[in-house]
Image (cartoon, helix red, strand yellow):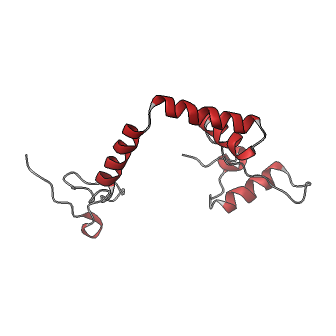
């Protein structure tokens, strides 16, 4: 099998579109991956299913007792973390178009008919 020499973009192995070229060996990888794998295996061997049930029960009991942080952890694990919301405050007289324009400028989105109308970046 012949290997194509990565040469675009100053020899960094990326094509003009930013994608890796064929034959690019990739990076060195995570230097800590092997150690993390061993530690994760040790943790899995040390914790039994009963241990996990006990921890979950304690978390549920703390949440029921009013511990807000325990409730947050429990709900985040059950339903996933909530999406980030952007709240616009200030002049309530702004039109939706003006609000979209503010958000687009904040995120560096160039104005276009589509994202002014829908408030989304054209993908």
Expressed as whole percent of the image width and height from the top left, the position of residue 64 reads 75, 34
- The answer to whether residue 42 is left or right of residue 10 is right
**37 or 17: nearer the eye?**
37
Q: Quarter of the image holding residue 89?
A: bottom right
Q: Is residue 55 above or below residue 90?
A: above
- The answer to whether residue 22 is left or right of residue 58 is left
Residue found at x 62% / y 58%: 109
Q: Can you name the residue that lies furthest to the bottom here?
A: 10
**122 or 88: nearer the eye?**
88
Expressed as whole percent of the image width and height from the top left, the position of residue 85 reads 71, 48
Q: Is residue 73 above or below residue 21?
A: above
Residue found at x 31% / y 48%: 38
**16 or 40: nearer the eye?**
40
Expressed as whole percent of the image width and height from the top left, the position of residue 74 reads 65, 37
The mark total stands at 0
**94 or 80: nearer the eye?**
80
Q: Quarter of the image holding residue 10?
A: bottom left
- The answer to whether residue 29 is left or right of residue 95 is left
Q: Can you name the residue that lies furthest to the left here?
A: 1
Q: Is residue 79 above or below residue 97?
A: above
Residue found at x 22% / y 56%: 24
Residue found at x 44% / y 32%: 48
Expressed as whole percent of the image width and height from the top left, the position of residue 19 reads 33, 54
């Amino acid at each position: 099998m012949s290997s194509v020499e990565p040469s675009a973009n100053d020899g960094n192995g990326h094509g003009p579109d930013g994608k890796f070229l064929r034959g690019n060996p990739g990076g060195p990888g995570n230097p800590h991956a092997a150690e993390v794998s061993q530690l994760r295996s040790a943790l899995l061997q040390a914790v039994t299913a009963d241990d996990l049930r006990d921890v979950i029960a304690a978390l549920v009991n703390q949440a029921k007792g009013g511990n807000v942080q325990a409730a947050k952890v429990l709900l985040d694990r059950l339903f996933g973390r909530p999406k980030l919301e952007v709240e616009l405050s200030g002049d309530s007289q702004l039109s939706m178009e003006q609000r979209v324009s503010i958000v687009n400028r904040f995120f560096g989105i160039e104005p276009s008919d589509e994202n002014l109308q829908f408030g989304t970046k054209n993908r």
